[in-house]
């Protein structure tokens, strides 16, 4: 590895004229300078491109797409266009703290891991992940099982080795949501490690209208991810209950067909009655 390797930063964007500069400048302010910034404009119909073009920096490239294809396709375009040994992805409404690239690079090399992730803060003050459970597991199998109970990692907190992303063919473009979650599960399933930088390095700004706010997208994508990980999920009763419950929740939210088999298994699970007891108990505590 080179002493100061190039780190490629991929920013997919669509109609973010009001927020894109905040994201770009947070990359330009990084205290690690050997970077390239690749912005994939996913056929914006506002002034996003005009805003981007106000920045004069040789490290910045813009790839405009002729058709709107979604963030997975845009990120894969960025991976293929990148020259760096390492890659990180930033959403076009969020921002990194100035040490993100330098310290992530240090951790990924020290741990010889496939990727590394950090904590992040919502602009209302909440910090995630609240705990470090994933970092406490030694094996990738244990980390995979834990992550199947819910994704605690935000994509813009991750730095990957480019070779890992290429070997896994990047993001699954058939998924309309949670494609980053799917990628993490595939990496862990292969036995590769993901290291942890125990610092807040990303500020997330809540924005309406993202793909992960569409319940139909979530329902369809989670079912596909479940199929990919069915052997692990179906051999763990707690995981099976968790995925049955989430499937039911998003089926209701998206007005999709409810799978009666999953519903029956949910009701017959002892975890259902534990959940029910906690709900009832909390209700009485809150209404005393």
Image (cartoon, rainbow, N blue to C red):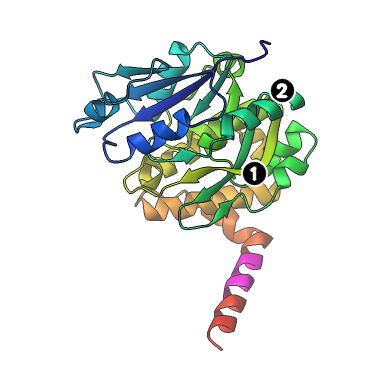
Residue 136 lies left or right of residue 286; in this view the side is right
Report which quarter residue 217 is drawn in: top left
Mark toward the start of the polypeptide (2 vs 1):
2
Quadrant occupied by the N terminus: top right
Magenta segment includes 89: no
Q: Residue at x 59, y 24 (%)?
A: 160
Q: Residues within 10 Å of mark 1 (few under 14, many from 20)?
A: some
Q: Secondary structure at mark 1?
A: strand
Please name the predominant secondary structure of the magenta segment in the image: helix
Q: Which residue is mark 2?
A: 109
Farthest-out residue, right = 138
- The answer to whether 153 is drawn above or below residue 172 in the figure is below
Report which quarter residue 51 is drawn in: top left
Residue 264 in sight from this viewpoint = yes
Q: Which residue is mark 1?
A: 199
Residue 265 lies left or right of residue 220; in this view the side is right
Residue range in magenta is 273-279
């Amino acid at each position: 590895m080179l002493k100061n390797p190039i780190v490629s930063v991929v920013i997919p964007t669509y109609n973010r004229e009001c927020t894109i500069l905040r994201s770009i400048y947070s990359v330009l302010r990084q205290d690690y300078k050997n970077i390239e910034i690749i912005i994939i404009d996913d056929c914006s119909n506002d002034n996003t491109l005009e805003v981007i073009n106000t920045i004069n920096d040789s490290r910045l490239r813009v790839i405009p797409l002729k058709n709107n294809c979604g963030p997975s396709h845009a990120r894969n375009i960025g991976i293929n266009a990148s020259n760096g040994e390492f890659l990180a992805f930033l959403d076009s409404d969020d921002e990194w703290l100035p040490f993100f690239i330098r310290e992530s690079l240090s951790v990924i090399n020290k741990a010889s891991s496939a990727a590394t992730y950090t904590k992040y803060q919502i602009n209302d003050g909440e910090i995630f992940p609240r705990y470090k459970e994933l970092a406490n597991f030694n094996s990738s199998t244990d980390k995979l099982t834990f992550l199947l109970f819910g994704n605690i990692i935000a994509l813009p907190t991750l730095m990957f080795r480019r070779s890992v992303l290429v070997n896994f063919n990047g993001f699954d473009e058939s998924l309309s949501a949670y494609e980053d979650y799917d990628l993490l599960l595939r990496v862990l399933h292969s036995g590769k490690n993901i290291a942890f930088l125990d610092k807040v390095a990303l500020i997330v700004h809540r924005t309406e209208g993202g793909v992960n706010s569409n319940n139909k997208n979530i329902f369809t994508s989670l079912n596909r991810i479940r199929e990919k990980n069915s052997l692990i999920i179906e051999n763990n009763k707690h995981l099976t209950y968790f995925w049955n419950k989430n499937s039911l929740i998003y089926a209701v939210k998206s007005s999709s067909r409810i799978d009666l088999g999953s519903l029956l298994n949910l009701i017959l699970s002892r975890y259902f009655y534990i959940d029910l007891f906690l709900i009832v108990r909390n209700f009485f505590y809150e209404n005393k």
